[in-house]
Amino acid sequence: MRSFSNVHPVVLIIFFLSVLLISMFTWHPILLLTALASGICFSILLGRGHNIGRNIAFYLPMFILIAVTNPLFSHNGETPLFFMNGNAVTWEAIVYGIAIAVMLVAVMLWCKCYTIIMTSDKFLYLFGSIIPKIALILSIAIRFIPQFKDQIRRVNYAQKAMGLYTSDSYLDKLRSALRVFSVMITWSLESSVETGNCMKARGYGLKGRTHFSLFQFGRNDGILLTYCIVCIVTALLGVALKCIPFYFYPRISGITSTLPAILTYSSFFAMAFMPCAYELKENLKWKYYVLKI
């Protein structure tokens, strides 16, 4: 079950934009680690624990590469650890590289969760009446990416089932990739023509055309929206009023532990882990009702 996807799109878009913006534009270690930890937990809950090994194999090397690359090119900082080719590798540059890696991985994880939760119909519901053409193009583009991946998988499996390209030679793998790419180009063109014909048949672009939506803003959505707004405003006020000052250069500063700083950390923590708590609550409720049957 993906219970959080049943929340109203207005609440969802406010939540995801807030988490992504705070993760990208605040460089405080506690906020970055909170965004990373919550993104990992929520992506695991959405995937039900599947493909964990594949995700680790993708994100971990990228994390290490970004963390190692920064101190090789940036030599700022007052704490040199060793010298490489006459250039100092500083502690501040290493920590800054780790912070960049944490931020990028956290943003990528939350973008992945966004694509799972915010479907094309929700995006059109939010922006279809404001920017209809742009919303439609973005909705089709967002929907096209997972469709393209699934179709590649189907074509590849179908060719292997027919006995094609089953050897381990690199030439055979290259031929298979080129053949799949050719099939996918044809499929993409056919899909675009079919989409255009369907839109024309359904009267897209005609004046007076109404829009149908199943989304209704309920009491539960109001509670979640109020909760998000309170957490967002508290966290942003803490950042704007410089209650959590932190800098990497020229020397790494300490973590502020004043009452406003703790309130800022707690607010962002409560907001970032809200979907995880919501998913767990709904799953426990579902199991409870199943046991009562």
Image (tube, rainbow, N blue to C red):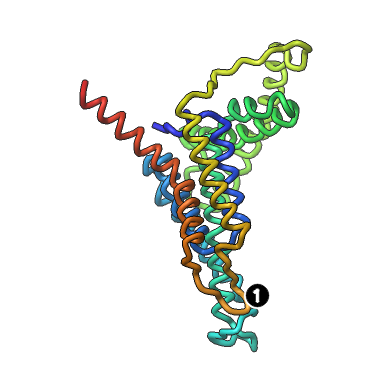
Q: Position of residue 72 (x, y in %)?
A: 61, 76
Task: Please rate how many residues cluster around mark 1, counting C-alpha atoms within 10 Å: few if below 14, some from 14 to 19, many from 20.
Answer: few
Above or below for 65 versus 225: below
Residue type marked 1: Phe
The image quadrant that residue 141 belongs to is top right
Report the number of numbered marks.
1
Q: Quarter of the image containing the C terminus?
A: top left
Q: Residue 246 or 146: which is nearer the viewer? A: 246
Answer whether residue 88 is visible to the viewer in this image.
yes
| SS category of the residue bearing label 1 | helix
| Residue at 50% over, 68% down | 256
Snapshot quadrant of residue 194: top right
Front-most of residues 270 and 207 = 270
Between residue 233 and residue 286, name the one nearer to us.
Answer: 233
Report the residue that reaches farthest toward the front.
259
The residue that disc 1 covers is 73
The structure residue drawn at horizontal position 65% and vertical position 75%, both measured from the top left corner, is 73
Would you say 86 lies left or right of 219 here? right
Which residue is situated farthest in the left direction here? 292
Q: Where does the N terminus fall, quadrant-wise?
A: top left
Tell me what residue is drawn at x 57 percent, y 68 percent. 246
Residue 246 position (above or below residue 51):
below
